[in-house]
Amino acid sequence: MSIITKLAIAASLATALSTAAFAQDLSGKVVGFSQIGSESGWRAAETSVTKQQAEERGVDLKFADAQQKQENQIKAIRGFIAQGVDAILVAPVVATGWDDVLKEAKDAEIPVVLLDRGVDAPEDLYLTSVASDQVEEGRVAGNWLVGDVGTEPCNIVELQGTVGSTPAINRKKGFEEAIAGHDNLKITQSQTGDFTRSKGKEVMEAFIKATNNGADICAVYAHNDDMAVGAIQAIKDAGLKPGTDIKVVSIDGVPDIFTAIAAGEANATVELTPNMAGPAFDALAKFWADGTEPEKFIITESKLYTSADDPQGEYDRRKGLGY
Amino acid sequence: MIRRSLLKLANPQLLALIGVLLINWLLFPNFFRVTWQDGRFFGSLIDVLNRGAPVAILAVGMVGVIATKGVDLSVGAVMAVAGAVAATMVVAGYPAPIAVVAALVVGLLCGLWNGILVAILDIQPIIATLVLMVAGRGIAQLITEGFIVTFTDPVLIYIGTGSFLGFPMAAVIALVLMIIVTLIVRRTAIGLFIEAVGVNRAAASLAGIRSRMLLLLVYSLSGLCAAIAGIIVAGDIRGADANNAGLWLELDAILAVVIGGTSLLGGRFSVPLAFVGALIIQAMNTGILVSGFPPEFNLIVKAGLIFIVLVIQSPLASRLAPPRIKPVAKAAAK
């Protein structure tokens, strides 16, 4: 490789990094955002992060809360079209029934970006969709545990999300993929904790009784942080040390799990980033600059956080977001 | 005399509870193992008492309402409201006793609201309490501003997770409440009045029972019980979760009352048996958790067991069963 190619690569890398690090100035652009509602802390955080991201780029964000109703979302999108916004962000509450309103937006030449959930509509009706890869989240959690236990035998208990829900199915699948082929790791108990703290605690209590008062459990894998927080309390009530006697790994990255990681009571969490709007604005900026069509599915990073990643700082960064 | 009270003990509810516990023991041999740890009892059986307490408390309030031919669908939402009130107040710096009293008063007011809709405005109970079932969770979310409000107040945490003489505080509260309410309704005429209103409100009123007052009383008690359960649930997870606290527990409470042999058509009721009904439901839940069934089977197993329990105590089954009173009657004839 000649020195010139090396320099060229370095230069292009530098440009790539700088575009990633500095948000583009989109001042003067008006973007409508139809949010589902605020049914969970994560949803509230997504709303605040979207507003932040818009502000950083100078975007005038029109926000509409649909209160979990599709008809409200469709009304809001029609309103945005009538106002002649430059782009529309939608977090669709359900997958079906979007064709008509998306067509109206397309006819008005307003690009639509879907956030964190997909729709059953022809792909040419929207610019792109930004979402996390839930299977990957499970895989990252599983890989961390595989690396952490090494060759030691490890019995895992699993706190599943609501039976039949997509995140529960995908996060289970990813985790199982990650530990497949490592015979020292096996899931010995698996039950649903309905994604809630109290059920997570109740199920963990039962698991501890069922496994020689917890002596046979090496790690607990929870499909979300709230269940992990409940499980941590159950482990403490049983006279064991969460984080040491029983390792705790979960998914979501809500503030309370960072407090637990800082206190040494949880080991790792995989973040489901509430920043879906950042990548959406980046894709829009490129699209407006030179008409680059982004990929249809933009996947956000599933980042792992452990005690080495300044959990207290991560907590402070998240606590005001509305989780 | 002794023989009769023994016969009274051998009712379908207690048999069902023992049956469910035995099934649990077959599926999980250590089910009855109770150890002493950190100054309290520790074991699956204790979990049944502890986890069953919130529904048992709801059932104690619900049974009075159902005996008047009513139903209170709002108890789950009232739990969320009471938990939210207690949690936000301790976080705001109020002392725990004041926060607890405030939460109880809020629960009482919620119950009173239901009572007014039913007794004074004559709205059908299922609709009247549906209002608060829907609105209550919204109110709880407004109070917590959509967050899970976490707290570290030792008093609230003690109510949810502490122990008294080695038994979980929640179970102790439930038991004491059950005994107090039983004494009130059975050592006074109130129980009979409630049954009279449930059987025929118009006739009861004509007979001189102040049925409006009585309805206000039972709905208020139900609200108060819901508030107690809400405080316990919040203390248990050290936080008020407005979205999930008490979700669908109204249905478990109604089921507990029905398993306890009280008819949804009002009339005869039993507070202790509703309490046992709640324990039966929880024994099933805990059994499913320790048995290692895949979670996809939870609801089917639960539905199957409940079906069996209800069939055992159906009027048809009691007609088919060998008569129990006969020997006493024979003895009397001699």
Image (cartoon, coloured by chain):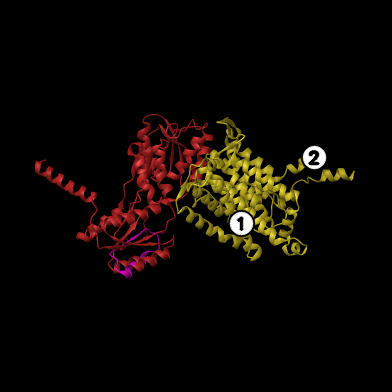
Residue identified by numbered label 1:
B111
**Residue A89 inside the magenta-drawn segment:** yes
Figure quadrant of the C terminus of chain B: top right
* Host chain of mark 1: B
**Residue A88 inside the magenta-drawn segment:** yes
Return the x and y of residue A145 as percentages of the image width and height. 38, 36
Q: Residue at x 73, y 54 (%)?
A: B190
In the foreground, B252 or A175: B252
Q: Earlier in the sequence, mark 2 or mark 1?
A: 2
Q: Is residue B302 left or right of residue A221?
A: right
Return the x and y of residue B136 as percentages of the image width and height. 53, 57
Mark 2 packing: few (<14 Cα in 10 Å), some, or many (20+)?
Answer: few
Q: Residue at x 24, y 53 (%)?
A: A23
Q: Which chain is yellow?
A: B
Going by the numbered disc 1, the residue's amino acid type is Gly
Residue identified by numbered label 2:
B3
In the foreground, A109 or A15: A15
Toward the top, the furthest residue is A152
Figure quadrant of the N terminus of chain B: top right
Find numbered disc 1 in the image and state the secondary structure of the residue it sits on.
helix
Chain A: what color? red
In the foreground, B77 or A116: B77
Find numbered disc 2 in the image and state the secondary structure of the residue it sits on.
helix
Magenta stretch: give its range.
A80-99
* Host chain of mark 2: B
From this viewpoint, is residue A131 visible? yes
Kindly check if marks 2 and 1 are in contact, taking CB atoms under 8 A apart as contact: no
In the foreground, B62 or B161: B161
Foreground: disc 2 or disc 1? 1
Toward the right, the furthest residue is B334
Going by the numbered disc 2, the residue's amino acid type is Arg
From this viewpoint, is residue A116 visible? no
